[in-house]
Structures are given as C-alpha cells and as structure tokens.
C-alpha cells in the first residue's frame, strides 16, 4: 500500500477513546453513541434525512433544547453529524449524517429491531421488558 493510500485510509478512520490497554471495538463504538440521546438522534436523521434543529426537537420526543444542542455538538465533534448553515437571517441550521454517521445504520436499526422484538410499551405499573 502506498503512503498516499495509507494516509487516505487513515483520514477516513475516527480517533476514539478506548478503556484499558487492549483496543476493544465494542467499547470504542459504544463511546461514540452511548449517551442517552445519541442513538435516537442518529436514528431520526437516518429515518427523516437532513433536519433543522426544531424539526429534530419535535422528532426526538422528550429532549430539551439544551440537551439536543449539546448532543448535536458532541455528535459533530465525533464526526457523526454535519452542521450546515442554510441561511444567515434568520439563522437556519440543518443537521445531517456524515458518512461515518450513516455507516451506523445497521447498528441503529439492529437496536430498533431488538426493541421491537423484546420490549413492549409499559403499562403504568409494569416494566417495559417483555
């Protein structure tokens, strides 16, 4: 592999934290999406495509504006979400998934499918685990 090819491949990979001395891909992947709202935001962007802030807030039921803003900043820093300014006045921002974010599709959809198979909507006095 030439230096140019190696550098190109390295540029496509994300640098992430890993616990312990041995690299663990599960731990590393979890560090990217394991915050409470991250997988939900990625799922909504996969399902609905690029979205504005208010649209995402409506799609992610129960999230506060502050938490959504912080989560989007974190996902952008982790190179999973792209933030694009659409208009200056009034300021309109659109969020979309990067290639890395879109590559999480099988993981996010597996989480959705597992939930559909193993969880039920809770009654007032019951657990949500089937």
Image (cartoon, rainbow, N blue to C red):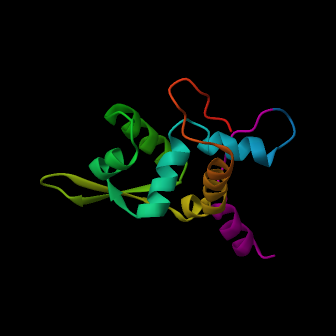
Q: Which of 55 and 78 lies nearest the eye of the viewer?
A: 55
Task: Pinpoint residue 5: horizontal percent, then vertical percent.
Answer: 72, 74
Q: Is residue 23 left or right of residue 45?
A: right
- Of residues 36 and 116, the one nearer the viewer is 116
Which part of the image, by quadrant, shows the C terminus? top right
The outermost residue toward the top is 125
* Magenta part of the chain: 1-19
Asked whether residue 13 is drawn in magenta, I would say: yes
Within the image, what quadrant is residue 66 found in?
A: top left
Q: Residue at x 61, y 58 (%)?
A: 109
The spot of residue 50 in percent (x, y) is 38, 62
* Number of marks: 0
For image coordinates 61% across by 34% down, the residue present is 128
Is residue 71 positioned above or below 114 on the image? above
| Residue shown at the point (59%, 27%) measured from the top left | 126
Residue 37 in the image, given as x and y percentages of width and height: 50, 39
Q: Nearer the viewer, residue 55 or 10?
A: 55
Residue 19 seen in the figure: yes
- Is 37 magenta? The answer is no
Q: Residue at x 63, y 43 (%)?
A: 119
Q: In this rendering, does residue 81 appear at all?
A: no
């Amino acid at each position: 592999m030439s230096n140019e090819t190696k550098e190109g491949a390295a540029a496509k990979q994300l640098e992430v934290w890993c616990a312990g001395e041995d690299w663990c891909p599960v731990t590393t992947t979890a560090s990217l999406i394991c915050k409470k709202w991250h997988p939900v935001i990625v799922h909504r962007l996969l399902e609905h495509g690029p979205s504005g802030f208010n649209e995402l807030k409506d799609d992610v039921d129960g999230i506060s504006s502050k938490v959504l803003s912080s989560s989007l900043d974190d996902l952008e820093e982790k190179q999973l979400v792209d933030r694009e300014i659409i208009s200056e006045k009034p300021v309109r921002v659109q969020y979309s998934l990067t290639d890395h974010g879109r590559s999480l599709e099988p993981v996010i959809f597996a989480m959705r499918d597992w939930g559909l198979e193993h969880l039920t909507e809770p009654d007032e006095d019951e657990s949500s685990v089937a």
